[in-house]
Image (spheres, rainbow, N blue to C red):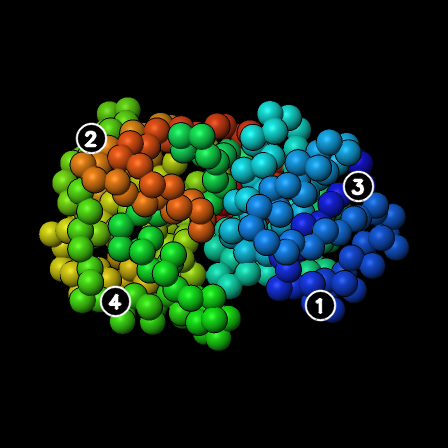
Amino acid sequence: MERKALLILHGKQAANQAVRKAVMQKRKDGWDLAVRVTWEGGDAERYTQEALERGYRTIIAGGGDGSVRDITQALMASGKEDLTLAVIPLGTANDLASAAGIPEDPAEALALLDRPPTAVDVIQVNDSYFLNMATGGFGTEVTTQTSEDLKELLGGAAYLLTGLTRFAEVRPAEGEFEGPDFHWQGEFLALGIGNSRQAGGGQRLCPEALIDDGLMDVAILPSEVDLLASVRGLFRSGDNGGKEGLFERARLDRLTIRTPEPMHLNLDGEPLEDTEFELKVLPRALQLVLPKNSDLLS
């Protein structure tokens, strides 16, 4: 196994001494480990493209779910095969890492590089890609409008606070969902499409999703459910958050979403706006560094 990788570190973590110490130790262990630090939007994707051109095949995302998505997008858009992604969870919520069991400690996360990576699915939405989850409806509005300052102060609880303060603004969206042997149409409050299990700081919208089964887990929260109970459950952390039974669920390899008005579909922090979304699973399209016996594996 080639012991060469590039760590793309979120700019807010540039002075993280635990990361610095872990990188130095990995180099002592024989790894050729380079580091680039992001400064502005688009840096992570550009650094990934440059690294692939220079022969790197393993990229480490040192940040949150947004960093993971940016790097996944660049890896998939490159058209190259046998690429590996690793994660040091350094964001506010770290939903993918949390669901996968990737350690928060930088040294422990980097130690996983010595394990063989696992082939996992990637979901394509129109011309974009994501690894964790796409969300729509009220939950998406909350996660995109929660301020960075509030997230830094409160962590994942910031999403709950924002959701509660905007409770009076809750309005359902309308859409039609169609896939193999599945059709649902109506008004909904929240939508989760999971390759993994959670988003928005611990919202376990797809608690049984697996990242290597060739399927996406779809969770639709209809508007006719009890509004207060559903919003409270939607932003409560923990297994299912008391939400089981509220959602319309399906497990599909492809899905078409049509909406009468433009809708935001949030791909781990990257919003897409359209009236039609074509989603499909790309089975085992990327190598991901995971702990042994990760809960996300079938």
Looking at the image, residue 285 sits to the left or right of residue 280; the answer is right
Percent coordinates x, y for residue 7 in the rendering: 71, 49
Residue of label 1:
15
User: Which amino acid, mark 2?
Assistant: His
Of 151 and 214, the residue lying toward us: 151
- Residue 276: name its quadrant: top left
- Spatial separation of the CA atoms under disc 3 and disc 2: 46 Å
Residue of label 4:
166
Q: Earlier in the sequence, mark 1 or mark 3?
A: 3
User: Which amino acid, mark 1?
Assistant: Ala
Instruction: Check if mark 3's residue and mark 4's residue have beta carbons within 8 Å.
Output: no
- Spatial separation of the CA atoms under disc 3 and disc 4: 46 Å
Q: Residue at x 69, y 55 (%)?
A: 37
Q: Residue at x 60, y 25 (%)?
A: 79
Instruction: Check if mark 4's residue and mark 1's residue have beta carbons within 8 Å.
Output: no
Residue of label 3:
4
- Spatial separation of the CA atoms under disc 1 and disc 2: 50 Å
Asked whether residue 259 is in view, the answer is yes
Q: Which of marks 1 and 2 is nearer the N terminus?
A: 1
Q: Which residue is drawn at 27% across and 62% down?
A: 233
Q: Earlier in the sequence, mark 4 or mark 2?
A: 4
